[in-house]
Amino acid sequence: MSTHPGACELCESPGGEVLWQDGRCRVIRVAGAEAQAFPGFCRVIWKEHVREMSDLAPADRRHLLDVVGAVEAAVRAAVAPAKINLASLGNVVPHLHWHVIPRWTDDSHFPAPIWAAAARPVPARPQPASAALVAALLSELGVAP
């Protein structure tokens, strides 16, 4: 974790099941109700406590966005959603992270954002195995398993 203890949950804990990481960021699989409603939902979390994209050096920004793109492609391969939503809000946790959210036209919140009120019950969808997400992610990153 980061060197910013005591004030940030993403500095103090992984934030979910770690699927992959390097020296700069980690990819986690979201758990709980969000995972049930949006199978394959992942986050890309910058390891150091940084609040904004513009606080990163240009090479770090490129690296982070390359990882976000690889996660998007991996989630698409693993769960075949109708659409992927990418979001970097940081209002609740002011620590740079990107949400990679698979969406379906019949999901509980469609067409609204996942943070809006649900429009219908959560449909039953299979959860992708972590191994499938990891394999797709490693392939997208060009990293050997």
Image (cartoon, rainbow, N blue to C red):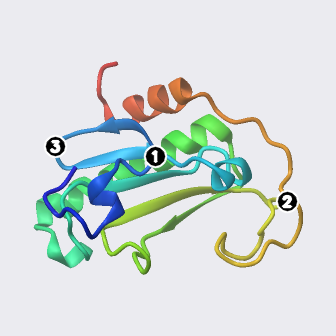
Does the image show residue 65? no
Which residue is pictured at 64% across the width and 74% down the height?
A: 115
Residue receiving disc 3: 23
Question: Does the residue at mark 2 contact the one at mark 3 (Cβ under 8 Å)?
Answer: no
Instruction: Estimate the spatial distance between the alpha carbons at disc 2 and disc 1, rounded to whole Å.
Output: 26 Å
Pointer 1 or 3: first along the chain? 1
Instruction: Please indicate whether residue 81 sits to the left or right of residue 138 in the image.
Output: right
- The picture places residue 142, in percent across and down from the top left corner, at 31, 31
Residue lying at 13% horizontally and 66% vertically, measured from the top left:
58
| Figure quadrant of residue 139 | top left
Asked whether 80 or 127 is in front, the reply is: 127
**Residue 76 bears which disc, if any?**
none
Q: Amino acid at mark 1?
A: Gly
Which circle's residue, 2 or 1, is located before the other in the chain? 1
Question: Quick one: SS at disc 2?
Answer: loop
**Residue annotated with mark 1:** 16
Query: Closer to the camera, 4 or 23?
Result: 4
Q: Please name the amino acid that badge 2 sits on.
A: Asp
Judged by depth in the image, the label closer to the viewer, 2 or 1, is 1
Task: Single out the mark in the foreground, 2 or 3.
Answer: 3
Q: Amino acid at mark 3?
A: Gly
Going by the image, does 77 lie left or right of 74? right
Q: Position of residue 26 (x, y in %)?
A: 31, 46
Residue pictured at 35% horizontal, 61% vertical: 9
Mark 2 and mark 3: Cα distance apart in space? 38 Å
Q: Residue at x 44, y 77 (%)?
A: 92
* Quadrant housing residue 119: bottom right
The residue identified by callout 2 is 106
Q: What quarter of the picture does the C terminus occupy?
A: top left
